[in-house]
């Protein structure tokens, strides 16, 4: 019921779905939200939005929200509602008991790319300063950790190089392993506008995504490669550029490390990287590869945009390094209209990584073994800190199964649905003595938890998110927390109950601490964010209002570093029993495992996951369009509604993963990226068969 007669109030906040980071005006009357309107002054969206951001916020009002802390001694027992005091005291005493009994490395935490920078900073502080280890990881582990690793190694910072608006200056757009019109819709439409203005387009994707051919847009080259072969394709593009003398020698001379370039050149010129060899591996015609390479190298400003189709592979990091090689080879870094631009899936993937949520790095990507950085944090936090990197999520789970890891605090993440090999995750959770979940809904993972702490939706939070272009924007509270406490307050109270003094009065004070301890954030404050609207880091003495285009004069690391990127096929191969390759992705209307979008009542949403299969593969199996099919891998099976389409090529099937009932993550493999353990969600050998009876 709208409170009549009250004035309409407008509050500016940031969308909590994808990494575009659209700014919204939230119109409220009393405690009623009237509507969300895209903010014309939003620096990432300029008054545009997609259907999710504009309408899919009513989950915040869902009666299914858990608003009271819940506890139980064992997962077989029913939940019991308890007070915040009781829940926090129990969590703190259990973490202390377990650390004393099994050692301080037996406890840890996982933070979320959905939460604010301030919350993520506090979770890693809880782990480092209170748990006294580095067992902190983020759900970015399962999406863009190869981006963090690869771009830091090549350029010196774990971040995209250019702002979204830079696309207005792009002459060539190269999209690999991303589907912007579904995954990043507002940026996808900005991309379409630039393409309609005449920019040329190269797409490397196993599917015919919409941008391959849509009204007034047709990709110049669609390199329809087999899943798992990105590195071979990228190497062949580089091979062609060098073979035809199209590289930018002046750029390389001036800005790149000569020794690494020399070694890389020797490697890339080998026959194994030729387009002909790549044709055998990827299935893409060698002539097409050569033509695309020429366009990328000579078409003017060329910008690369990539997504999880690059990172979620056994060679995810290698592919990111190969993309960086390609951009440096052609001088397409450090200027408008170019760059290497990861399209981050979740709203705060960039921010959660920036905040020190990885087990080896403090905020600002500084290694925990670095004495000077550790001394800075030790002085600020008044505790000695562990110089050894901690456990990644995968290590925590495996160690739990071995009996060495006993307690976990999970903030805003469903490990059972978002991480690969759900059966292994469940076994690990069942092996622990304390599993604490802090989230807005009870979810699949809560079945295996001892304590559930209710969380806040973005409409109940104050803080900041950092989008895919390093843009820090304010999140402003418009509703009181349904559970009575802000999430940062809960983390602070756990720390206090464990005996560590933590006394912030507002998230702005947490940001002030982040700025004091993080060189790339030194100039960031809420006051400046309110004045400027947003800030792209680095923001410090050298860049008082932030840095839209990075690496202009020189690379952040000094000289750009080339890396050898040998193609190593994934061990996951089609077999007689599992002859098809499954790859996964999302649709515009839903978001990840659907926790929010499936609870939105004010729009008709798609109701089940879909499996796309080529007509010839469907015919071979007697499968008809619209039928329910079973997808089986060596890990398990799931059920999907079948769509017979030529969007996928023979031998490849594609599934969405928004509905836990379809069990997509039961089907996917345990294989992961060699450098970061990011799971290989994009390649699983499967069989598809019709379900006899629905
Ligand atoms: Fe939200 Fe992304 Fe849609 Fe923008 S494009 S409204 S950030 S989901």
Image (spheres, rainbow, N blue to C red):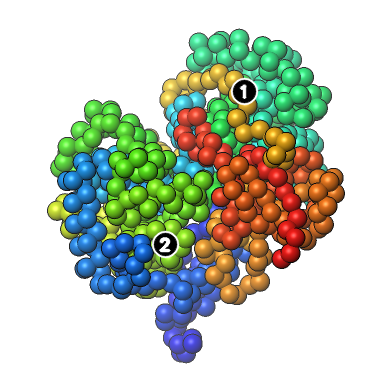
In this rendered view, identify the residue nearer to me: 512 or 316: 316
- Secondary structure at badge 1 equals loop
User: Can residue 483 be seen here?
Assistant: no
Q: What residue lies at 43% left-to-right and 58% top-to-bottom? A: 445
In this rendered view, identify the residue nearer to me: 211 or 61: 61
Q: What residue lies at 25% left-to-right and 69% top-to-bottom? A: 84
Q: Residue 298 location in percent, x, y?
A: 72, 25
Q: What residue lies at 78% left-to-right and 61% top-to-bottom? A: 626
Q: Which residue is under mark 2?
A: 447
Q: Looking at the rendering, in which quadrant would you find the C terminus?
A: bottom right
Q: Residue 608 location in percent, x, y?
A: 65, 63
493 vs 58, left or right, is: left
Question: Could you say which quadrant of the image residue 531 lies in?
Answer: bottom left
Mark 1, Cα crowd under 10 Å, few <14 / some 14-19 / many 20+, is many
Q: Which of marks 1 and 2 is in front?
A: 2
Q: Which residue is under mark 1?
A: 567
- Secondary structure at badge 2 equals helix
Q: Residue 363 location in percent, x, y?
A: 34, 40
C-alpha distance separating marks 1 and 2:
41 Å
CB of mark 2 near ligand 1 (< 8 Å): no
CB of mark 1 near ligand 1 (< 8 Å): no
Q: Is residue 48 above or below residue 316?
A: below
């Amino acid at each position: 019921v709208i409170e009549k007669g009250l004035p309409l109030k407008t509050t500016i906040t940031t969308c909590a779905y994808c990494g575009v980071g659209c700014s919204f005006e939230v119109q409220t009357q009393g405690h009623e939200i009237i509507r969300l309107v895209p903010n014309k002054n939003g620096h990432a969206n300029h008054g545009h939005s997609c259907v999710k951001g504009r309408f899919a916020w009513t989950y915040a009002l869902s009666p299914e929200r858990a608003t009271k802390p819940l506890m139980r001694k064992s997962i077989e027992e029913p939940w019991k509602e308890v007070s915040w005091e009781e829940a926090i005291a129990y969590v703190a005493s259990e973490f202390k008991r377990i650390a004393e009994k099994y050692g301080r490395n037996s406890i840890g935490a996982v933070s979320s790319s959905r939460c604010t920078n301030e919350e993520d900073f506090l979770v890693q502080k809880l782990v480092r300063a209170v748990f006294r280890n580095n067992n902190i990881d983020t759900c970015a582990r399962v999406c863009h950790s190869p981006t963090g690793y690869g771009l830091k190694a090549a350029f010196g910072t774990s971040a995209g190089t250019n702002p979204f608006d830079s696309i207005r200056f792009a002459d060539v757009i190269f999209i690999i392993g991303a589907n912007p019109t579904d995954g990043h819709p507002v940026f996808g439409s900005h991309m379409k506008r630039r393409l309609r203005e005449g920019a040329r387009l190269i797409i490397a994707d196993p599917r015919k995504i919409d941008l391959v051919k849509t009204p007034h847009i047709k990709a110049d080259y669609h390199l329809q490669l087999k899943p798992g072969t990105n590195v071979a394709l990228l190497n062949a593009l580089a091979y062609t550029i060098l073979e035809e003398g199209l590289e930018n020698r002046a750029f390389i001379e001036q800005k790149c490390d000569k020794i690494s370039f020399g070694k890389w050149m020797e490697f890339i010129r080998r026959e194994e990287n030729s387009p002909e060899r790549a044709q055998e591996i990827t299935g893409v015609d060698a002539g097409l590869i050569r033509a695309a390479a020429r366009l990328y190298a000579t078409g003017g400003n060329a910008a690369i945009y990539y997504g999880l189709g690059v990172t979620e592979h056994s060679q995810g990091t290698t592919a990111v390094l190969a993309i960086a090689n390609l951009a440096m080879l052609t001088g397409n870094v450090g200027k408008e209209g170019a760059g290497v631009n990861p399209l981050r899936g979740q709203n705060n993937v960039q921010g959660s990584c920036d905040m020190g949520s990885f087990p080896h790095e403090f905020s600002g990507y500084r290694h925990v073994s670095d004495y000077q950085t550790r001394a800075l944090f030790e002085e600020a936090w008044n505790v000695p800190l562990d110089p050894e990197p901690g456990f990644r999520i995968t290590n925590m789970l495996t160690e739990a199964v071995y009996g060495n890891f006993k307690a976990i605090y999970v903030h805003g993440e469903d490990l059972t649905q978002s991480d690969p090999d759900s059966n292994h995750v469940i076994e690990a959770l069942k092996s622990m003595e304390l599993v604490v979940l802090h989230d807005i809904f009870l979810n699949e993972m809560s079945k295996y938890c001892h304590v559930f702490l209710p969380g806040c939706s973005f409409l109940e939070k104050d803080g900041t998110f950092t989008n895919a272009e390093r843009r820090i924007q304010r999140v402003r509270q418009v509703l009181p927390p349904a559970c009575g406490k802000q999430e940062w307050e809960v983390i602070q109270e756990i720390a206090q109950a464990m005996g560590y003094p933590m006394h912030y009065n507002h998230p702005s004070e947490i940001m002030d601490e982040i700025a004091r301890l993080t060189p790339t954030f030194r100039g960031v404050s809420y006051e400046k964010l309110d004045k400027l609207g947003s800030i792209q880091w680095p923001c410090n003495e050298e860049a008082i209002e932030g840095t839209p285009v990075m690496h202009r004069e020189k690379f952040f690391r000094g000289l750009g570093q080339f890396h050898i990127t040998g193609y190593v096929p994934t061990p996951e191969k089609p077999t007689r029993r599992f002859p098809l390759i499954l790859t996964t992705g999302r649709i515009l209307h839903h978001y990840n495992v659907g926790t929010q979008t499936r609870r939105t009542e004010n729009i008709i949403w798609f109701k089940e996951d879909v499996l796309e299969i080529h007509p010839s593969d469907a015919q071979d199996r007697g499968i008809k369009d619209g039928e329910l099919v079973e997808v089986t891998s060596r890990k398990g099976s799931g059920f999907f509604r079948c769509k017979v389409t030529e969007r996928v090529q023979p031998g490849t099937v594609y599934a969405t993963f928004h509905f836990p009932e379809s069990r997509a993550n039961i089907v996917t493999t345990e294989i992961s990226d060699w450098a970061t353990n990011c799971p290989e969600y994009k390649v699983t050998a499967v069989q598809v068969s019709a379900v006899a009876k629905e």
